[in-house]
Amino acid sequence: MPDFRKIGILGLSVWASMQLEAQTDQGLVQVDVTSVLNGRSVSTFTNGKIVSWSTGFDGKYSGEATLAVAQALGNTNPKALPNDGFFPANNRHPDVQLHFSNTDGVSNQSRYVTGAASFGFDVPVASYSILHVFALSANGPSMIDVDLVYSNGTVRKSFEVPDWYNYVTDADRYVLADDLDKWDMSNARTEQGHHYIFGFDLRPDAGRVLTRIVINKQNAGALTFWGATGVRTGPVKKRSSNLALNKPVSVSSTEANLGNIASNATDGDASTRWSSLYTDPQWIQIDLGKTYLIDTLVIRWEAAYASAYKIETSVDGTIWLPARNVASGDGGVDEMVDLNATCRYIKLTGTQRATTFGYSLYELEAYGNEVVTNYNDVSIDLPMVYPNPFQDRIQLDLPANTEVELMDKNGRLLYKGAEASIQTGALSKGLYLLKIKQVGGTQMIKISKN
Ligand SMILES: [Ca+2]
Ligand SMILES: [Ca+2]
């Protein structure tokens, strides 16, 4: 038998880069929340001198200090925060790394929030068995609603963040740092031994894929947020660059006189947006320039979002396949992972507006696999698929743990499985796509029927 890996299916082959990062399936995650941090609330002892806190927990009155600061100020046996911001695991929490350290006298350490406000940050896209956030309140308690944004929906958990003067521990809340002293802006110690930083146990659903956390603070209290730590149960889904960035966009309409033009939706600028006329339905469509395997679509809505919309994809811009239907959208960021669409064009059609205004979004982002057309670029062996062109059946010589999907040239699924042959007598002549899914990678090849 000839080696069809080299000749049988050559034609035009495409190979999608690895979808999953080569790393262990489990692990501790210190979430990168630097995008939301806005102040320094801990004095550090950096390069031999005290760098004072600048953003207090209650305006300009109260901050914290690392142990080395307290010692430099001559305090014996002080209660202070660890020099490296590290809290070893105990029976309530895993190892926690907060964002202050004596080695850093410049970066923001925490987020200070007063009044009603929301802020959110992405997490490494994965399943989590454990997820905690850390906060304290001043000027009384703060009520927070924490949204766990999964790939297939959002779950809200609500907590009272106690005033940092008040000790509390219960099923979902515990003390991360206890009995802290309190320091004014000139680093004089004003109170001793009764302030706290709290941990909040979010108990994520390990059966779902988490993408993002949004913290919504109600009006009362002054909240200081410190960070988030989790434990992954599955691998991190690695992302490509944004394939939609600066790609051409067409739309059904544009709101007059505001400059919210179509191309604002892919300009990579979070402050520019596209907005439509004030009627249903309206659509926006991106041309990615060539066919990709798209796994993730991110929609960043403005306040005038779609409460109902659908996503369709197309290879040729003519025949459209349904990808997602959203019946009760909640605006903000909508992130769809495992979209698994082979397409050049992506179309969002809004069918129900959430407000009296039109549809308005800051950005559409598409992530997926780079595609190469040069066979020599393929660095892994293709399983044997023959003959090509095929007639009444396709023979497959597949390694273990491999599944194939046969699609027509527009990406419609015709067969999915792992059998040694696919019956193809009923198919018409022409071009087809065969997706070969293996651990660590997905390949896509074009084959044809004579
Ligand atoms: Ca934009
Ligand atoms: Ca949303």
Image: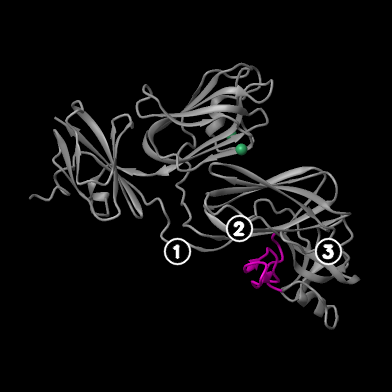
- The quadrant of the image that shows the C terminus is top left
The quadrant where residue 357 appears:
top right
Look at the image and tell me whether residue 232 can be seen: yes
The verdict on label 1 being within 8 Å of ligand 2 is no
Q: Amino acid at mark 1?
A: Thr
Q: Alpha-carbon distance for marks 1 and 2?
A: 17 Å
Is 139 within the magenta? no
Q: Alpha-carbon distance for marks 1 and 3?
A: 39 Å
Q: Quick check: marks 1 and 2 in contact, CB under 8 Å? A: no
- Mark 1 — residue? 24
Q: Which residues are magenta?
A: 83-108
Q: Earlier in the sequence, mark 3 or mark 2?
A: 2
The quadrant where residue 50 appears:
bottom right
Disc sitting over residue 63 in the figure: 3
- Quadrant in which ligand 1 is drawn: top right
Residue 309 in picture, x, y percent from top left: 55, 27
- Mark 2 — residue? 31
- Secondary-structure class at tag 2: loop
In the image, taking residue 270 as reference, residue 368 lies left or right, namely left
Residue 236 in picture, x, y percent from top left: 48, 55
In percent of the image, x 68 and y 63: which residue is there?
A: 99
The quadrant where residue 413 appears:
top left
